Amino acid sequence: MRIRTLLMAAAAAAAFAAPASAAITISLTSQNAPLALQPGEQLVADFNNAATPEAVLLPGFDLDLVGSTVGVCEGCSGYSGTLPGNATHYLTIPGNASAKLTSLAGLKTFSFYMGSADTYNSIRFKGANGFDVTLNGGQFTQGYVGQSWSWGKRVNFDFGADRVTEVILSSSGNSFEVDSFAVTAVPEPATWAMMIMGFGVAGALLRRRQVALARA
């Protein structure tokens, strides 16, 4: 099942506090497949190590958990639902808690796996040029909310020409269960510098070859 919609701030100014040009494409994919990532995406947090719940898997990222916990269905605190098809540890965000993923560069896309959505769940994206969009559970699932734990899908966000540096998941009630954060990141400045240097070296070698051929 694949559902795709384009959410534009110009058409929903009351819902999204964002510049008129801001747009996010949302798709729901891969039922019961937590690690079915989109082409080009990289896993950045899997929450599998309960001893270090804020650990990230890629350099240039930071994860800050405020009141959120990492656990599995067995022995969970009573307010945490299950994640279908996911036997590993996952993140539970209870009422008045949050999880913030920060990128030193910028994100083209972000995705996560979740069991089901509630209207009191929310996700906020902040980025360059004043980009600031907040969506509640009903918006990022195209209206689907409820306690059907068999739902279990990956939610994919594509920011188009915008670049996001902060992703904040929060909930005003119990609770918001998520796993397997994945991203498509913009290359860091050091990477761009290495690429530019590489192009420069390649150009110099080509010029030397042309001069050598001309003299031959």
Image: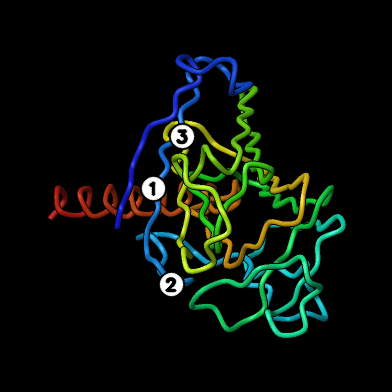
Contact, mark 1 vs mark 2 (Cβ under 8 Å): no
Where is residue 116? Give x, y as percent: 55, 58
Q: Characterize the local packing of mark 2: few (<14), some (14-19) or many (20 or more) Cα atoms within 10 angstroms.
A: some
Query: Label 3: which residue?
Result: 24
110 lies above or below 113: above
The structure residue drawn at horizontal position 59% and vertical position 36%, both measured from the top left corner, is 135
Which of the two discs, 1 and 2, labels the residue nearer the N terminus? 1
Residue 150 relative to residue 71: left or right: left
Question: Foreground mark, 1 or 2?
Answer: 2
Query: Label 1: which residue?
Result: 27
Q: How many numbered discs?
A: 3
Query: What kind of residue is marked 2?
Result: Asn
Question: Foreground mark, 3 or 1?
Answer: 1
Would you identify the image quadrant in which residue 165 lies?
top right
Query: What kind of residue is marked 3?
Result: Ile
Query: Label 2: which residue?
Result: 32
Front in this rendered view, residue 209 or 122:
122
Specify the label residue 1 is tagged with: none
Q: Quadrant of the N terminus?
A: bottom left
Which of the two discs, 2 and 3, labels the residue nearer the N terminus? 3
Where is residue 28? Give x, y as percent: 40, 53
